[in-house]
Structure formats: structure tokens, C-alpha cells
Image: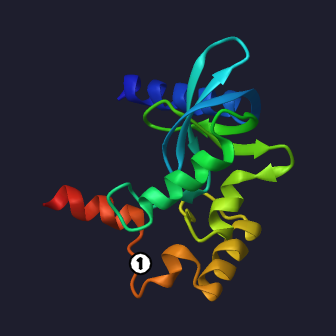
Amino acid sequence: MKKFSLLLLLLFVSSYIYANKIIQGRIIKVTDGDTVTLLAKNNKKIKVRLYGIDCPEKKQEFGQTATNYLSSTIYNKNVKIEVKNKDRYQRSVGVIWLDNTNINLSLLKQGLAWHYTQYDKSQSYADAEKAARKAKKNIWSTKNPIAPWDFRKNKTKK
């Protein structure tokens, strides 16, 4: 129990220290709609999960559309990432900025992501999803869109 408590403390401290760190570099890979690889200024490759959103999985409807949108927007471009924390896979989790554009928010506005309210409570993200739903953009144009977390859950049950 002591080892577990120490591990939790170390994870919390490392997440806190890592939070709100700014990293800059060039996007060298777009894995899917919410995961990229950044080549930092020091030539270190950093895998980044976009904070506060969840895009459709590749095998879901609009999954490839989200990936293509993200790729056409930031691939091979220099960006700044505001790192919020690290996830359980040790990926940096952050907000990607291309110039003055919040890319995470752009995906929500395009109707290519869900606001991941389990991890983020920002009003701007909630408003962006709501507007995309109302305009029936992309994922919201379908009758019953399945949230990616439900899609993943159903996939593991099979």
C-alpha cells in the first residue's frame, strides 16, 4: 500500500510539474484526429494527445475526416503546445496552437470532435460543440452519433 501511495504521489507531482509547460516544434505525424507527434526544437519526438476533446476513432464514421482535417491544418507546420498533463500512456496532453488558433477548439467547431467533459469543463469548448450540433456539422449530421468512448467500450466487449 505504501508503494502504491508513493507511486500516486509521484504521478501527481510529475503531472503538476509538467502541466502548462509550453513546447514548440513541427508536427511530423498525425496518428488520428486527436493524436500527433511533434518534433521538438531539441530533435526529440513527443507524442501528443489533444486536450479536452475526443475525435471519432479511425473505424468510426468521420474518423478519417477528423484525421484528414487535422493533417491538412497542422502537418509539417510549426506549432506551440500548451501541455496540461501526461496521460496513462505517458503522452503529453495539450492544446495545440497554430499561430493564434486553438486547433482543439477548431476540431469542435468543425463538428469533428466531442467535448471531453470528463477532463475539461471550459465553456468555450462546450459552446463550440453546441454550435456544431445545432448547425449539424459532420458528426452531428448523423442521426445517432456514437461517442468515441462508447465506441471503444463496445469494441472491447466484442
Q: Quadrant of residue 154?
A: bottom left
Farthest residue in the right direction? 100
Foreground of the two, 97 or 91: 97
Q: Is residue 146 above or below residue 33?
A: below
Residue 58 x %, y %:
37, 54
Q: Along the horizontal axis of the image, is 155 left or right of 45?
A: left
- The correct choice, above or below, for 23 with respect to 139 in the image is above
Where in the figure is residue 43, as x and y percent of width and height?
A: 65, 12
Horizontal side of 147 relative to 156 (left or right) equals right
Residue at point 70%, 52% (across, down): 103
Q: Amino acid at mark 1?
A: Pro
Front residue (pair 21, 71): 71
Position of residue 69 measured from the top left corner of the image (x, y, whole percent): 59, 55
Q: Pick out the residue farthest to the top.
A: 42
In the picture, measured across the screen, residue 56 lies left or right of residue 115, that is left
Q: What is the image's colouring? A: rainbow
Depth check: 77 or 84 in front?
77
* Residue matched to label 1: 145
Residue found 76% across the figure and 53% down from its top? 102
Residue 158 x/y as whole percent? 13, 60
> Tag 1's secondary structure?
loop
Q: Residue at x 55, y 65 (%)?
A: 112
In this view, which residue lies farthest toward the left? 158
Give the answer, above or below, for where 55 lies relative to 132: above
Above or below, 102 relative to 29: below
